[in-house]
Amino acid sequence: MARYAMVTDLRKCVGCQACTVACCQEWGVPAGQARTNVRTTPLSGTFPDLKSTPMVEQCNQCDRPSCVEACPSGATYKDAGGVVQVDGGVCIGCGFCLDACPYANRFINTATRKVDKCDFCSPRVVRGEPPACVATCTAHAKYFGDLEDRGSEVHRLVFWEGARRQETSSVAIGPNVYYLGKPELVALAFSSDPPHSPKLLTAGQALNGLVRPLVVGMVAATFLGQAVAFFAQIHKGEGDSHE
Amino acid sequence: MSSAVPLTPVPLSTEEAAAMSQRSIKKHDVAIMLVHWFNAATWILEVTTGVALITSRLFRVAPAWYSDLIGGVFGSRANLLKFHIALGVLWIAVLLPYAIFGFRNYLRAEMLNFFERDDRRWLVIRLKMILGRTDEPLPPQDAYNAGQKAFALVVWTMVPVVGISGLIMAFQLFSTTAVGWAVVFHYLAVGAVVSGLFIHVYMGAVFPEEKPAFFSMLTGNVNELFAYSHHFKWWRKVKLAEQAHERKQSPGPEKVP
């Protein structure tokens, strides 16, 4: 069992979007959409003491992903390597998972009309290649590897260098993307766009809270009704029918 | 039976009843029977696979092992979904012409004319009878009794919802919001039909008094005694039509009663 993780060193990142471009090229994501993005935080502080930092966003492959449960069809699942996958053959594009992600890292691909997101370049990793963003990063700011492997670079960065992940007191679902950098800049990167509580779409709430109990109740009622009639019929025996 | 067709059911003598039970009246066309059994087979397969497609703890109705089992039968969950969609599209392709061509002559004329006084009384008395609260005779019924009509009404409002929401989900039509709500309406509409199906199947296949109705879906015919005692209004129409036909065939001196 592996536990894949990614580490981004914000001290090296220059916000060039080379990772974004490489990702879109690799996976044919339509223009205007992306599985990863480098946003720059707004300026913080007062002149001349201003601060800003790039922040690389992508799916966090959380340990306890809130998107998996929101997916009605089971298209979204966590694989053996801890990576949250989307099976395009099972996804119907209902969008229930979109707001379930506290980091808003899922989107509906306009070409496939199904859910799309970062999967740590699983097909490349299977071939023994690093994820496209890691391979292309001009500043070598991104690291990818297995946290279970004590000799790996990501293990060292997370457990010895103190790389941090974006969690808050209300949203702590075990993201597996870590960030290195000056503590105040990492804090700024995290706080400028904090994760929201996982939400289920209104349609999903209606299905879970209203329609499912209603349907189960209706079906159970008629099933029990005919079952009672059936046993009453066995008990009573059948009379003459017009045969 | 005299040639006069009574307006209301009259008690039959044993000989009359025996003679009537030997004669049959045509109830269903072959096309209708084929559509019925195709529809039945499709519902069984689509509900079996559809239930397996919902795996989330928040929405599922079957345990996880059931989804794994059915997914395993099809090799993968993607194949399972492909089958569910392909069969659903075929179902729409078969039922749509039936709905279009059958609506005027068959459905509107016999099934969806629901809110008649006798139908409402029939439902009330039938319910009381099941509960053992009355021995009142059931009001005479047309080709379909009020229970069958009520189920037809559920089916004919819900089936378009099932088909349209299914297409929206299968091909991601309109918008993500539309697909999301299609999941909800697909679930609800299927639930309403399946709920009614238990009664439909029990009444059709198990309930002794309605057995001729079950066999009529296989042979196309019911015996006249069953028609007389369960669908008197329909029996009367059939008899009147027969007489009118005979008069046309042999315009004799005999007076119309």
Image (spheres, coloured by chain):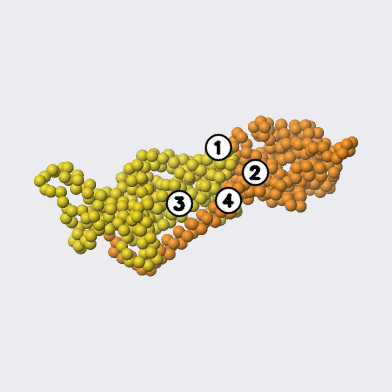
Residue, disc 4: A206
The reply to whether residue B215 is in sight is no
How dense is the environment of label 4, judged by Cα within 10 Å: few (below 14), some, or many (20 and up)? Answer: some
Q: Amino acid at mark 1?
A: Phe
Q: Amino acid at mark 4?
A: Ala
Q: Quadrant of residue A26?
A: top right
Q: Quadrant of residue A237?
A: bottom left
Looking at the picture, do discs 3 and 4 lie on one chain? no
- Residue at the spot x=58%, y=54% of the render? A209
Check the image and report above or below for A183 versus A37. below
Looking at the picture, do discs 1 and 2 lie on one chain? no
Looking at the image, tell me whether mark 2 or mark 4 is earlier in sequence order.
Answer: 2
Residue, disc 2: A98
Q: Which mark is residue B193?
A: 3
Chain the render paints yellow: B
Outermost residue to the bottom: A235
List x then y, in percent, for residue B12.
21, 61
**How far is mark 4 from mark 1, CA to CA?**
20 Å
Secondary element at image label 2:
loop
Secondary element at image label 1:
loop
Q: Amino acid at mark 3?
A: Val
Looking at the picture, do discs 4 and 1 lie on one chain? no
Of B148 and A147, nearer the camera is: B148
Looking at the image, tell me whether mark 3 or mark 1 is earlier in sequence order.
Answer: 1
List x then y, in percent, for residue B69.
53, 52
| Chain A pictured colour | orange
